[in-house]
Image (cartoon, grey):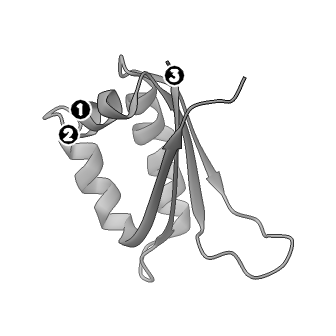
Amino acid sequence: MLTKVFFSYRLKPDASLEDFLEWSRTVDQPFTNAQPAVHRFEVFVVSGTDGNAPSHQIFESIWVESWEAWQATTGSEAFAPIVETWKTFVDDSDTQALYGTRVV
């Protein structure tokens, strides 16, 4: 059964949003979307909320075969450069990952 994964995070204070978005568009999204376990990977910049200030700047929405398949993908040797570059941009101290299945 397909699994939906959501990630939310902030960029590091010294990271450039423009540089992150360029890397996301040209490297991260094409590479991640080409992985066999990934059905769709999208990245969103938070524009606001209906109340309080947003706690995170970036949300990722990913359809994958399963959480285990996603973990295997991101833990692979081929994916290591993506993870390492991502870590140069992201304050991963409060990154949140949620995953689940669609209610139908």
Residue found at the far left of this picture: 77
Dividing the picture into quarters, in which one does residue 80 lie? Answer: top left
Disc 2 to disc 3: CB gap under 8 Å: no
Q: Within 10 angstroms of label 1, few (less than 14), some, or many (20 or more) residues?
A: few
Q: Within 10 angstroms of label 3, few (less than 14), some, or many (20 or more) residues?
A: some
Q: Which mark is residue 18?
A: none
Disc 3 to disc 1: CB gap under 8 Å: no
Q: Position of residue 48 (x, y in %)?
A: 78, 70
Residue at 38% across / 30% down in the picture?
31
Dot 1 corresponds to which residue?
72
Please identify, in this view, whether the residue under mark 3 or under mark 1 is nearer the observer: 3
Helix, strand or loop at label 1? It is helix
Q: Within 10 angstroms of label 2, few (less than 14), some, or many (20 or more) residues?
A: few
Dot 2 corresponds to which residue?
75
Dot 3 corresponds to which residue?
2
Please identify, in this view, whether the residue under mark 2 or under mark 3 is nearer the observer: 3
* Separation of residues labelled 3 and 1 (CA atoms): 15 Å
Name the foreground residue: 89 vs 92.
92
Helix, strand or loop at label 3? It is loop
**Position of 93 compared to 80: left or right?**
right
Q: Amino acid at mark 3?
A: Leu
Residue at 41% across / 81% down in the picture?
14
Q: Position of residue 101 (x, y in %)?
A: 57, 31
Q: Earlier in the sequence, mark 3 or mark 1?
A: 3
Name the foreground residue: 50 vs 22.
50
* Separation of residues labelled 2 and 1 (CA atoms): 5 Å
Q: Amino acid at mark 1?
A: Ala
